[in-house]
Amino acid sequence: MRIIVTGGSGKLGRTVVRTLRDEGHHVVNLDRAGQRGEVVVVDLTDAGQVLDAVAGIDEHHSGVDAVVHLAAVPAPGLMSDVATFHNNMLSTFNVLQAARRAGVTRIVTASSETVLGLPFETPPPYLPVDEDVTSPESTYSLVKHLEEQLAIQLVRRDPELSITALRFSNVMDPEDYAMFPSFDADATLRKWNLWGYVDARDGAQAVSLALAKARPGFERYIVAAADTVMTRPNEELVAEVFPGVELRGDLGVNDTLLSIDKARRELGYVPAHSWRDEVGGDR
């Protein structure tokens, strides 16, 4: 396919672009930063620029089959709430609208684990959490929720449109894993996302699967690693940090508490990477 990736110079974006190209797709990276020759610089808050870039860019493309929208202020607290809202909400609307105007019906967007209730100052309603949990607690997560609602309404109006929102956990590269063993000393250090993470390579796998298996309509999926960042067992962690929270099924010893069952079942998502393999030893 011919695919536009927005934010292809970011932490997840770099791996997504590389993975899709390795699979044989023609990928155009739209971003506001990046190495010359590897990115087309576009201000995604400018609707005219976005529409023009999706419709065609000189030698890069004359039309695309799919759009992967990853670009955003990537986390709470990096900019003011107003700036985060304006940038992320407007960028997403512009990208989705431009894709629709250009006749693109296959779209994958980056949602976020933050819509689940991070940083879980209020305990989750049950564990593991799944896609039915939506409790945005920051401006960043509120925008992600609103982006999902926008997608729901757009596919309602266009029966051929497919939008898949991937609720990515905290994205990690292999070089990040050296710090993971230190988390065991304090269960609260990473309780803010239920001790979750996702390897960027598995995040890219989820994008590829969502593109390949897209059907008309809207779907959302949690995308996380198969395990937690901890070696301490889930039973111990939950008893210490979230006593009294309803447990739905067997938590496993170190299984993720961000349920990826839906992604496994419907996309065929199988996380291939764990920090334990990178750090080594018997962890």
Image (spheres, rainbow, N blue to C red):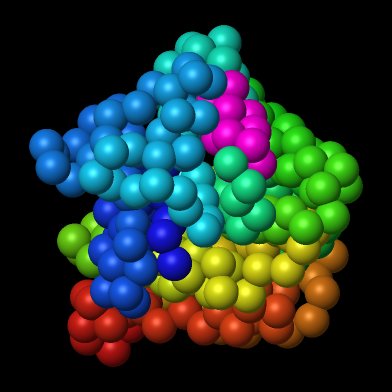
Q: Give the x, y percent position of residue 24.
A: 32, 74
- Magenta highlight: main SS: helix
Where does residue 33 sit, x and y in percent of width and height?
24, 31
Q: Residue furthest bottom?
A: 282
Q: How many marks?
A: 0
Q: Quarter-wise, where is residue 276 in the image?
A: bottom left
Is residue 146 visible from the viewing direction of this image?
A: yes
Magenta highlight range: 90-101
Q: Position of residue 28 (x, y in %)?
A: 33, 49
Left or right of 69? Residue 250 is right
Query: Compared with residue 249, is residue 40 higher up or lower down, i.e. above or below?
Result: above
Magenta run includes residue 91 = yes
Closest to the observer, 109 or 171: 109
Q: Quadrant of the N terminus?
A: bottom left
Furthest toward the right, the residue is 156
Res 31 quadrant in image: top left
Report the residue at 41% width, 34% height from top: 53
* Residue 119 makes an appearance in the image: no
Q: Is residue 176 above or below residue 209?
A: above
Q: Is residue 87 left or right of residue 166?
A: left
Q: Nearer the viewer, residue 147 or 23?
A: 23
In the image, 102 versus 49, the foreground residue is 102
Image quarter in which the C terminus is found: bottom left
Q: Is residue 119 left or right of residue 280?
A: right
Q: Residue at x 40, y 40 (%)?
A: 56
Q: Is residue 25 above or below residue 34?
A: below
Residue at x-position 52% and y-position 56%: 66
| Location of residue 93 in the rendering, given as x and y in whole percent from the top left corner | 63, 29
Magenta stretch holds residue 147: no
Nearer to us in this view, 163 or 59: 59
Residue drawn 52% across the image and 58% down it: 65
